[in-house]
Image (cartoon, helix red, strand yellow):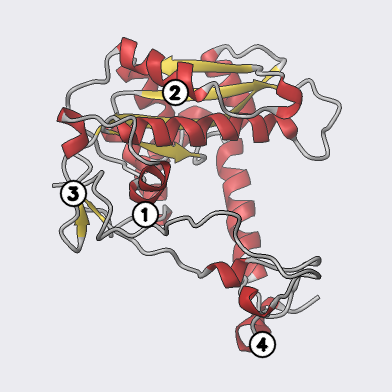
Amino acid sequence: MTDATDARSLTPPPAAADIEPAEPTRMRHAVPSFDLESQQSVPFDGRFLQPGALVDAPNPMMPLLDAIGTRRTSRSYSPEPVDPETFRWLIRHAMHAPTACNEQQWKVVYIDDADAIRDLLERGSASYLKGVRQCMLVCYNRRTDNREWLDHIQSGAALITTFQLLAHSVGIGSCWVGHLPNKAEVRRIFKIHRAYDPVALVSFGYYRNRVNVMPRKHEPARLIMHNRFVSEGLVLDSRRRTLFRTVARYLYYKLPAFLRRPLKPWTARFEKKFYYEVFD
């Protein structure tokens, strides 16, 4: 296997344009490409998207390409809470997401208790939760015979992705959170049935105003491989650094909660920061 320290200097994988199918093909239909400048679903001034406009003028029927292309993760929200009926509307339609064998075994814990959110924060969850008023914990039945591929995690993740697109279309931003205490601890906090696995926490709330646009990091040609995985050209993090963070995380979350609480201000310094985000 290619050593990660040398990966940056290796030849990149072949571009998708250089990969020819066995038989000549063409697109079945002419389809448009997404472009921030030409889309009309979310105001864009050349630098900032303004999804806050969707709060007063929701557009759940916006083109799918626009919903995908203008959605951005949001970690700061308007003080106005999302009402329960709107949340139920989002879940009702997110339930059209695919699941393994069409089992549809989701459960969603809606959380608006300030003490519960603060408790999660103090136990070592993502620091931005300090300003969050609403979130949901997506769970899925883990009693599956396919433990190798964790199809219950895939099924829960599909609901979250669909929820985030729907929420965006009606002016609700969201953030998918995996920076949480160990699953066993989360199960105890929220009294989750032993047959169910917490998949992720999702915070949400109405957009404030504008968000910075971060371009995608890769072209499709960097992602697409033909018939086999191409290892040449991979750029990987240092194994030593990853191992250190993995061990540190394991030890930190093994500490009793009462010891983690006073450590939270110190550990927050090592969390990934998102300085590119602009909210107002």
Residue linked to disc 2? 136
Secondary element at image label 1: helix
Assign the N terminus to one quadrant of the image: bottom right
Q: Upstream in the sequence, badge 3 or badge 1?
A: 3
List x then y, in percent, for residue 74: 31, 42
Label 1 sits on what residue type? Arg
Labels 3, 1: front one: 3
Labels 3, 2: front one: 3
Residue at left 13%, top 47%? 280
Mark 3 Cα shell of 10 Å, populated few (<14), some (14-19), many (≥20): some
Q: Upstream in the sequence, badge 1 or badge 2?
A: 2
Residue 274 location, quadrant: bottom left
Q: Is 55 positioned to the left or the right of 232 in the image?
A: left
Using the image, tell me which numbered label, if any, was put on residue 269: 1
> What's the distance in space between the residues labelled 4 and 2, CA to CA?
43 Å
Q: Would you place residue 15 above or below residue 105 in this image?
A: below
Residue linked to disc 3? 43
Residue linked to disc 4? 11
List x then y, in percent, for residue 111: 40, 17
Q: Is 135 positioned to the left or the right of 15 in the image?
A: left
> What's the distance in space between the residues labelled 1 and 2, CA to CA?
26 Å
Q: Is 272 positioned to the left or the right of 128 in the image?
A: right
Is 226 or 109 nearer to us in this picture? 226
Q: Upstream in the sequence, badge 3 or badge 2?
A: 3
Is 47 or 1 nearer to us in this picture? 47
List x then y, in percent, for residue 175: 40, 39
Labels 3, 4: front one: 3
